[in-house]
Amino acid sequence: MDSRALIFLHIPKTAGTTLNRIIEWQYSPFEIFTMDPYRIRATPERLKTLPEGRRRRLRVVRGHMFYGLHQCLPQGATYMTMLRDPVARVMSAYYFILRRPLNPLHRKVKKERLSIEDCIRLFPQRHNLQCRLIAGVKEASSTGDGRLLDMAKEHLTKSFSVVGICERFEESLMLMATTFDWEIPFYKNCKVSKTRPQIDPGTVEMIRDHNRLDVELYEFSKRLFEESLQKKEAAVQEGLAALRALPTPGAVQGFCNSALGAGRFVVNKIASAV
């Protein structure tokens, strides 16, 4: 990597928590700006108001955000992201809302016993979220569907060093490690959900219909992913072999890793808040 910052555009429910724990081992907590608009008010707007010297020292900006923050980083930036099958992502987001009381939609969904189908009808602002985040368009109605999809594809092609696929996490991780010169001493899957009820085929079609731009973008992203794998096949395969050969940490080592990781996480949150 050159001196440019890395922007991790974290699309909700795409294995981002696991990836964030890995990122925290690669960089100093003081070099990472983490978006957290609810707990510590670390927002894109706040990032833009930081002194230029501090913004220039950042090596990573990460979180749920819309494309475009590279414009406020004087050192320049490249992006990376993970995409997920739209049906699986929408289902995961729904169950996440159900089990998280602090989620803004939790109370309404629980109180009114809203189904996935109800949520699709009632919350159109959540449709095609992957496409809108990558296109950098907050209001889908502000641009036509064709233009929105074209913008997202163009950004992925020109501004993203790595486009990962959630369903192929380890290969995506090795692409990132190879591209950004990371070392992966270990990793642990975080926030892995339990098995959910079988979804009705009609619901699957409803999700795909209301997220057809995401469906097309996901297929486009898989092609980009395969092209990147082919270009770095030897390095990725070597990294995968090393990753899979790692011994499982014992209880003491696992506790130490978790404690150190939690410490780095807290320090970074504080650094992003002040």
Image (tube, rainbow, N blue to C red):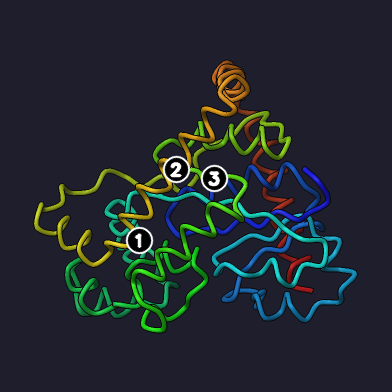
| Residue position for label 1 | 93
Compare marks 3 and 2 and give the one earlier in the sequence. Answer: 3
Percent x, y of residue 155: 54, 59
**Which residue is disc 3 drawn over?**
18
Which residue type carries mark 2?
Ile
Which badge, 1 or 2, is on the more N-terminal residue?
1
x, y percentage for residue 265?
69, 54
Q: Which residue is mark 2?
A: 165
How far is the residue under mark 3 from the one under mark 1? Answer: 16 Å
Alpha-carbon distance for marks 3 and 2?
Answer: 14 Å
Q: Secondary structure at mark 3?
A: helix
Is 229 positioned to the left or the right of 22 in the image? left
Q: Secondary structure at mark 2?
A: strand
- Residue 238 horizontal/vertical position (percent): 61, 18
So how many labels did they put on this image? 3
Question: What residue is drawn where x is 80% and y is 57%?
Answer: 31
Q: Residue at x 77, y 61 (%)?
A: 76
In the image, residue 95 lies at what x, y percent?
31, 59
In the foreground, 23 or 205: 205
Tell me what residue is drawn at x 86 percent, y 68 percent. Answer: 54
Distance between the alpha carbons at the discs numbered 1 and 2: 17 Å
Which of label 3 and label 2 is nearer to you? 2
Three-letter amino acid code of the residue under disc 1: Ala
- Mark 2: few/some/many CA within 10 Å (<14, 14-19, 20+): many
Q: Is residue 104 above or below residue 200?
A: below
Comparing 172 with 97, the one in front is: 172
Quadrant for residue 139, please give it: bottom left
Crowd rating for badge 3 (residues with CA inside 10 Å; few <14, some 14–19, many 20+): some
Quadrant in which residue 109 is drawn: bottom left
